[in-house]
Image: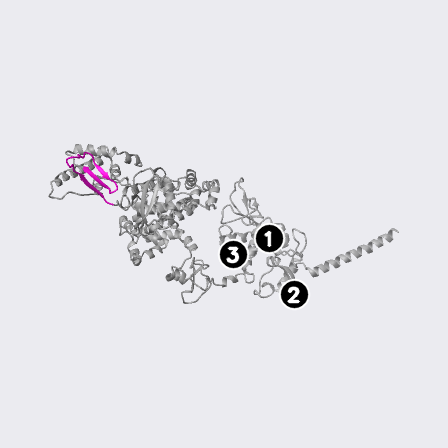
């Protein structure tokens, strides 16, 4: 009974073995195994492409090229990748007698390149045992004991690192699975990530993902066993991958296209031919639609122009060109007398004009008088304001539809019972109005900085209410209508107005926020790379908002980082307020004149300390004498001598009155207007008529006229002048300190 069972079991076992062998043969027919490693795995990333060739041999690509006894004796198109079929069969036969030190099976065709090492192994077994296979030179392989290693300095264990390709966490310790970049400090990779990248990028695009170093990076990765195929990148092998590059951009991107047939209409060799940007080639314009049509080969789109003008290369070139002003004068001579051409000057040209002083033949008085010719004397705009709230009153009145900047302005203060006073006729109220207005702007929330150097601020309420535009418009109106100039712009703000923000470089003095100043100083004063990195890390939030957050690789990076932070805080952050302010300054053509005569207007808009002297103050006044043959002329000449002595004493500080108080007594303002006083300052004399005796000086502020008493002695003249000037209640009350 037992034998029968045993016989039945034997038949059943033979049937199972037969079925298994049949299944294996069927599988081998469908998925044959590699002739070297005897594995049927099809994993191109690990073992290379598996392929069955015409001679019936199935091979993994890596098993083939790494076999120690196989040499490429044919051409690239002969045999299998240059390996002849006869040589391959001999190598398979040789390997069939060698056992693998890993799996103990025959077919180990790869041996360690170290001469004294007897180890041999299959390619897949070598991969599993972490052997190194160098796909370059002699295609050497190294066993797990003799494989090359990377030598790197110790890394601080407290730091956290990520793979520069997959961005997952990585242990910064050199090993078989972890590779260190040879060109970037503290850059690590997973071996598998690098291998996948190399297979995708190919030899021509395989490089460090951080610094784009190619030669050094490839050499080290090949040494550490990364296979870099000599092929094009996978994204270039796609069918019609770059088909769109063959199409030429054909569209007019001008703000206003003049072509009636549309923006995409093109007619070669005519005004409707489209010219592309010389930098990007992805923006175009019709010749007739572009202001730069005569320079078609050098046309730049606005986006590229902004980028180019921000580059350090341009600034260096401009600094060199500043040394040859005569040549630039000759080059630009043709556009000196054309306002329309001046408006079209590029940022670069306006920057050059700053240093060449091309447009400096006129004084600011002449320029403003030319602008004043726009004012219509027969059209009057009345403004009613309160001295204590001049800003809101000016906003309310100047926003009325009936107000025109080119009309004659009539001012009446609501706290003053006198009749309205008109610019150019009854001048003191208008002088006082513009004086109060400039004083308010200098201390308003629209500007920040010291009293003599202010920049734009970013105020959401002011931006929402469009106060920046109104401030620019008020300054333009004040300059043209005979009011005072601001005299508080910083050099940086003026440079943005005259030459453009793109070529303006702010300084530390332009930053008024204490916390921002500390952030910039901390980065600027970093003495080591570690200290710089720590400063960047501590201020990462601010740098991210400013668009300046980036990795620093050397101490030299801090200069550009500081420059970018200053540019953001002083210029880029307030771009919207600045643009609205410029729109306001365009009223009456003031901004155009600023850009045309920057050196002249710098003295008006920026602070320039001026110390009045007896000589310069005396030149403000014209003297109206009596006829030369009259008896009064002798007495008047004597009083003028007292007047000059009095001015000398004012300069020496031996009088109670100052020059500013005399100016206020005469005109109602403490500041000499940019366009000069209208009418001019004058001196007349108070002669007694036998009934009225004049002991003290008087003034007609509406006519800017100072009337001097006919004093007998200088002591009497000095005492009367001091008393009258220093004890006039109205002007003492309204004098702005």
Q: Nearer the viewer, residue 181 or 150?
A: 181
Identify the residue under disc 1: 112
Q: Quadrant of the C terminus?
A: top left
Q: Is residue 510 magenta?
A: no
- Answer with mark 3 or mark 1, whichever residue precedes in sequence: 1
Residue drawn at the location 51% of the way across and 58% of the way down: 204
**Front residue of 253 and 517:** 253
Give the structural element (helix, strand or loop) at label 3.
helix
Q: CA distance from mark 2 to mark 1?
A: 29 Å
Left or right: residue 533 versus residue 229 is: left
In front of the other: label 2 or label 3? 3
The x, y position of residue 622, in whole percent, is 20, 43
Measured along the vertical axis of the image, is residue 357 above or below residue 154?
below
Specify the quadrant of the image occupied by residue 296: bottom left
CB under 8 Å between discs 2 and 1: no
Q: Residues in magenta?
A: 679-708
Q: Nearer the viewer, mark 2 or mark 1?
A: 2
Q: Between marks 3 and 1, how big is the CA–CA gap?
A: 31 Å
Q: Residue furthest right?
A: 1
Q: Is residue 452 visible?
A: no
Residue on which the image places disc 3 = 205
> Label 2: which residue?
55
């Amino acid at each position: 009974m037992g034998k029968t069972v045993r016989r039945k079991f034997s038949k059943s076992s033979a049937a199972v073995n037969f079925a298994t062998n049949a299944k294996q043969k069927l599988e081998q027919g469908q998925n044959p195994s590699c002739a070297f490693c005897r594995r049927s795995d099809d994993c191109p990333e690990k073992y290379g492409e598996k392929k069955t060739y015409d001679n019936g041999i199935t091979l993994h690509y890596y098993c083939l090229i790494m076999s120690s006894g196989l040499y490429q004796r044919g051409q690239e198109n002969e045999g299998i990748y240059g390996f002849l079929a006869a040589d391959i069969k001999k190598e398979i036969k040789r390997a069939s007698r060698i056992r693998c030190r890993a799996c103990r099976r025959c077919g180990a065709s790869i041996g360690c390149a170290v001469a004294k090492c007897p180890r041999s192994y299959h390619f897949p077994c070598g991969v599993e045992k972490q052997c190194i296979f160098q796909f370059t030179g002699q295609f050497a392989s190294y066993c797990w004991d003799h494989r090359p290693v990377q030598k790197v300095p110790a890394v601080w264990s407290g730091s956290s690192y990520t793979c520069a390709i997959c961005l997952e966490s990585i242990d910064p310790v050199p090993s078989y699975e972890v590779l260190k970049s040879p060109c970037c400090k503290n850059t690590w990779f997973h071996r598998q990530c690098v291998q996948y990248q190399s297979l995708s990028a190919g030899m021509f695009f395989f490089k460090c993902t951080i610094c784009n170093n190619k030669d050094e990076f490839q050499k080290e990765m090949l040494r550490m066993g990364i296979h870099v195929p000599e092929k094009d990148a996978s994204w270039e092998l796609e069918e019609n991958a770059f088909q769109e590059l063959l199409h030429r951009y054909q569209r007019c991107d001008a703000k206003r296209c003049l072509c009636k047939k549309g923006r995409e209409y093109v007619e070669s060799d005519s005004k409707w031919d489209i010219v592309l940007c010389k930098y990007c080639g992805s923006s175009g314009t019709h010749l007739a639609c572009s202001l730069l049509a005569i320079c078609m080969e050098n046309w730049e789109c606005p986006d590229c122009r902004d980028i180019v003008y921000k580059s350090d290369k341009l600034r260096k070139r401009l600094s060199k060109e500043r040394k040859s002003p005569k040549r630039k004068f000759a080059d630009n001579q043709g556009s000196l007398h054309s306002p329309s051409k001046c408006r079209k000057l590029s940022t670069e040209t306006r920057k050059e004009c700053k240093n060449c002083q091309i447009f400096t033949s006129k004084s600011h008085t002449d320029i403003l008088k030319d602008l004043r010719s726009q004012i219509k004397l027969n059209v009057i705009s009345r403004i009613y304001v309160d001295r204590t709230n001049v800003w809101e009153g000016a906003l309310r009145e100047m926003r009325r539809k009936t107000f025109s900047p080119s009309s004659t302005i009539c001012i009446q203060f609501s706290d003053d019972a006198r009749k309205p006073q008109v610019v150019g006729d009854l001048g003191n109220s208008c002088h006082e109005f513009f004086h109060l207005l400039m004083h308010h702007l200098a201390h308003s929330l629209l500007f920040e900085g010291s009293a003599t150097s202010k920049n734009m601020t970013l105020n959401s309420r002011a931006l929402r209410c469009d106060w920046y535009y109104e401030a620019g418009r008020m300054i333009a109106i004040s300059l043209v209508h005979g009011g005072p100039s601001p005299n508080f712009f910083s050099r940086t703000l003026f440079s943005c107005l005259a030459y453009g923000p793109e070529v303006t470089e702010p300084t530390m003095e332009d930053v008024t926020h204490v916390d921002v100043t500390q952030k910039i100083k901390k980065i600027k004063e970093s003495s080591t790379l570690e200290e710089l990195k720590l400063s960047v890390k501590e201020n990462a939030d601010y740098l991210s908002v400013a668009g300046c957050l980036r990795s620093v690789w050397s101490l030299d990076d801090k200069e550009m980082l500081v420059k970018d932070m200053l540019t953001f805080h002083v210029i880029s952050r307030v771009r919207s307020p600045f643009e609205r302010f410029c729109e306001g300054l365009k009223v009456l053509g003031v901004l155009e004149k600023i850009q045309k005569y920057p050196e002249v207007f710098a003295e008006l808009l920026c602070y320039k300390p001026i110390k009045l002297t007896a000589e310069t103050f005396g030149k403000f006044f014209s003297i109206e004498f009596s006829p030369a043959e009259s008896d009064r002329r002798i007495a008047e000449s004597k009083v003028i001598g007292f007047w000059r002595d009095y001015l000398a004493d004012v300069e020496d500080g031996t009088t109670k009155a100052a020059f500013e108080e005399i100016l206020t007594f005469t005109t109602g303002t403490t500041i000499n207007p940019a366009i000069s006083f209208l009418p001019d300052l004058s001196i007349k004399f108070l002669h007694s008529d036998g009934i009225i005796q004049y002991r003290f000086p008087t003034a007609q502020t509406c006519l800017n006229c100072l009337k001097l008493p006919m004093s007998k002695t200088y002591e009497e003249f000095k005492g009367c002048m001091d008393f009258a000037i220093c004890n006039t209640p109205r002007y003492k009350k309204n004098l702005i300190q």
